Amino acid sequence: MAQLLEIASYGNVSKTALVYRANLNFTLVQKYLDHLENKGMISHSNGGSRATYSLTQKGWETLFSAKKAVYEMLGEGPVPAELVQFPS
């Protein structure tokens, strides 16, 4: 799910893009999207002919926490600023 948050961090990402970039099938991605949306980490909009997904503030915070945990487990120190780009 962290990978889906990372992909959605680019903003306005289609479900097809999530499927291909995460290398998962549509059924599994939909299950994860439903869960992430229910938890308030992503939002979707139905602009135009397709739905797109973006991170919410809670999603950004969760993504940052996940990256921070990985860096700490690897003993890499603080997360470099360029790996976590919060929206302006």
Image (spheres, grey):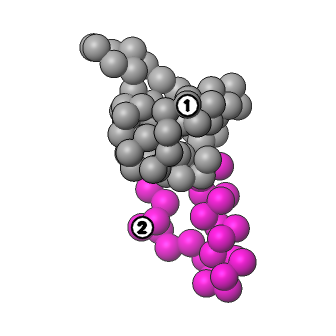
Q: Position of residue 61 (x, y in %)?
A: 62, 48
Quarter-of-image position of residue 51: top left
Residue sitting at x 54%, y 36%:
29
Q: Earlier in the sequence, mark 1 or mark 2?
A: 1
Q: Which residue was labeled with disc 2?
A: 82
| Residue 35 sits in quarter | top right
**Is the residue 73 above or below the residue 29 in the image?**
below
4 left or right of 58? left
Which kind of residue does numbered mark 1 sit on? Thr
**Of the residues tagged 1 and 2, which is closer to the observer?**
1
Distance, label 1 to label 2, CA atoms, is 32 Å
The residue most toward the bottom is 75
Asked if the magenta segment contains residue 84, the reply would be yes
Residue 38 is a magenta residue: no
Residue that badge 1 annotates: 27
Q: Please, what secondary structure does the residue beneath circle 1 have? A: helix
Residue at x 63%, y 75% (from the top left corner): 71
The range drawn in magenta is 61-88
**Above or below for 43 versus 82:** above
In the picture, the disc for residue 11 is none
| Three-letter code, disc 2 | Glu
Residue at 58 percent across and 36 percent down: it is 28
Residue 10 position in % (x across, y down): 38, 45
| 79 with respect to 13 (left or right) | right
Is residue 12 among what the camera can see?
yes
- Dot 1, crowdedness within 10 Å: few (<14), some or many (≥20)? few
User: Which secondary structure lies at badge 2?
Assistant: helix
